Amino acid sequence: MAASATSPVRPGFLPREAFDTLLRALEGAGYDCIGPRVEAGAILYRELNTGSDLPQGMEETQAPGRYRLRETGTPRCFAWACGPQALKPHLFAPRESLWRSERDGEGRLHFQSTAPEPRPLAVIGVRACDLAALALQDQHFLRAGNADPYYTRRREGLFLVAVNCTHPASSCFCVSTGDGPQAGDDCDLALDELDEGYAVRAASSRGEAIAQQLPLQALTEAQQAQIGREREAARAVQSRAMPGGNLRDHLFNAWEHPRWAQVAERCLSCGNCTSVCPTCFCHQQVDVPTLDGGSATHYREWDSCFTQNHSYIHGITLRPDTRSRYRQWLTHKLGSWHDQYGRSGCVGCGRCLTWCPVGIDITEEVSALLAEAGS
Amino acid sequence: MNTSLQVPWQAEVVSRVQETPSVFTLGLKLDDPAAPAPYRFAPGQFNMLYLYGVGEVPISVVSDPEHDDEIQHTVRAVGRVTHGLAALRPGDRLGLRGPFGRGWPLEAAAGQDLLLVTGGLGCAPVVSVINYVMQRRERFGRLAIVQGVKHMDDLIWRERYEAWAGRPDTEVQLAADVAGSGWNWHVGLVTDLFDRLSLPVEQAVVMLCGPEPMMIAAVRRLLELGVEAESIWLSMERNMQCAVGLCGHCQYGKDFLCRQGPVFNYPDISDRLGVKGF
């Protein structure tokens, strides 16, 4: 029953009924636990107190402009690909205050940082695509310049329990971007789900310390073979694909391509894609004074390159139409990211096409742009 | 944890000059125990000025980097924040954080002839260079200052330009598209002025600032005149909110203006300059 005393811990089997030992071990180590739960017809990361909170028996359908959950009776809790949220809102908050200013009776201003002091957070059920997106957000917020203190504080206390994806949706294309469906070592624990429980592998020393406390059993050969088959099937099932390689030059050469105007006919410029995208980082700053005028709070909140204000500069909007905004989004995501962060900003999660109200499919748009690009 | 780049310091307005009906210069003194002393910056860099309860705007610094008495910013009242800044008077407080970005290549330009080209009201970043050079005249070769405006009344600091014209090894050429009586300078485009200079422009280090169409036309003409692309530097403008390379608004292709700019070497942006949508 007890975990092996040798280190590192070998992958072991955690029976489904023992899942709560993982939550208790994490809580004992000081973490608040969040994990997937069904809310408002979608799977969202919410507070997780017990394994019975998990979306057991639920599967999903995703397609351009479509997301539906359905009850299938599967014993599994992770038989779905991804909900609308990635890790992004838990690190790069949708809205947070940066600082507060107070004005005293003499008109003096007093500035106070409002950097958060978050409790350590464990996230259960992280997907490989989201780990890849996290690595990109880490580059942007932690390493490109001075580390952002607001992001840093949440990131430092983050414990990641990945669950390898066995049920990619039709919207998924992480195989083509090289980001999934199987998690690598950039997490703390990596799980494979079986009907009867989980194979648990420690990927960090913190993960090992937790794994030591779990009632892990030996993983049978049959279980290992089953995991291998499911991993392979999860790769094989993906039919969507992002064209490979560095698309930067192709896309910038297609700057005047008629496809931009065609997609703009359909695009509502609503910003759903940038909200659900796990790597989009744009945000705006707003100052909110109190009614008595005695203090003001300076917030940052998610912004989108699809808004009119994003490219506003003293009286001019540099990207006045949807065509130029969609082009900005796509050429940044798949082009400029290579220069900025050494790879594409797309991890193949497919959220942008699922949550697009008119079902614009990024892979289809890119293929069209490449097919007749002026390169 | 260091949040100093993202949280302003308090600054006091110590001087205010109304340059034109809509342009004014604020002299500021940092008045915050958390602020660095002395405050240091390079010409061409900018600060984020915070108007209490309203918001922030990026404004380049026009005073001399070694002038410790006050940090000067020349501002045009165009939006909510800048109209509010225009109402500030000596003794009033505001927030300041900075400096941000890369300034002009003044180290590399030492010993060389300089051609400074400005247009419209966007001349403050270049005026900081003119002031810098005037204070250290022996470090640089000949200096040519070329400034163009739409209407002669748009020209601020005309007395300064006329005074600079009288300095040794310095020539000034001004142009206005629209001019009336009292305008002794060229009527036409700023690009017409390069041919009138006695300075051999092809050897000069060129620094440009102003509306993009002006800079694009100027670069085209300068290249025709034999100026090396690598000798041309431009100060660019985009929406700026965080100033620390995070918020994404100032992206200009692959570059974040607040980090890789606002001053760019022409070959580094020649693929984008003048292309709509960037």
Image (spheres, coloured by chain):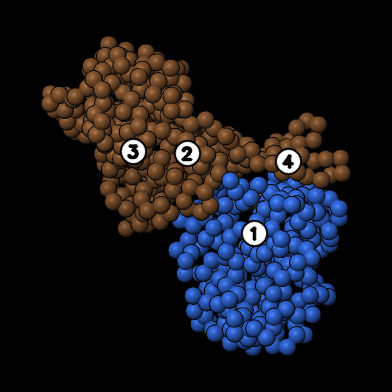
Please give the residue where the numbered disc 2 appears in the rendered image. A155
Colour blue, chain: B
Q: CA distance from mark 1 to mark 3?
A: 40 Å
Disc 2 residue type (three-letter) = Arg
Please give the residue where the numbered disc 3 appears in the rendered image. A204
Question: Does residue A42 appear to the left or right of A185 in the view shown?
Answer: right
Disc 1 residue type (three-letter) = Pro
Disc 3 residue type (three-letter) = Ser
Dot 3 and dot 4 residues touching (CB under 8 Å): no
Secondary structure under badge 1? strand
Q: CA distance from mark 4 to mark 2?
A: 26 Å
In the rendered image, the vertical position of residue A290 relative to residue A151, given as above or below = above
- Image quarter (top left, top right, bottom left or bottom right) of the N terminus of chain A: top left
Residue that appears at 69% across and 80% down = B136
Question: Does residue A235 appear to the left or right of A39 in the view shown?
Answer: left
Which chain is mark 4 on?
A
Please give the residue where the numbered disc 4 appears in the rendered image. A101
Residue mark closest to the camera, 1 vs 3: 3
- What crowding class fits label 4: few (fewer than 14 Cα within 10 Å), some (14-19), or many (20 or more)? many
Colour brown, chain: A
Please check whether the numbered discs 1 and 3 fall on a single chain.
no
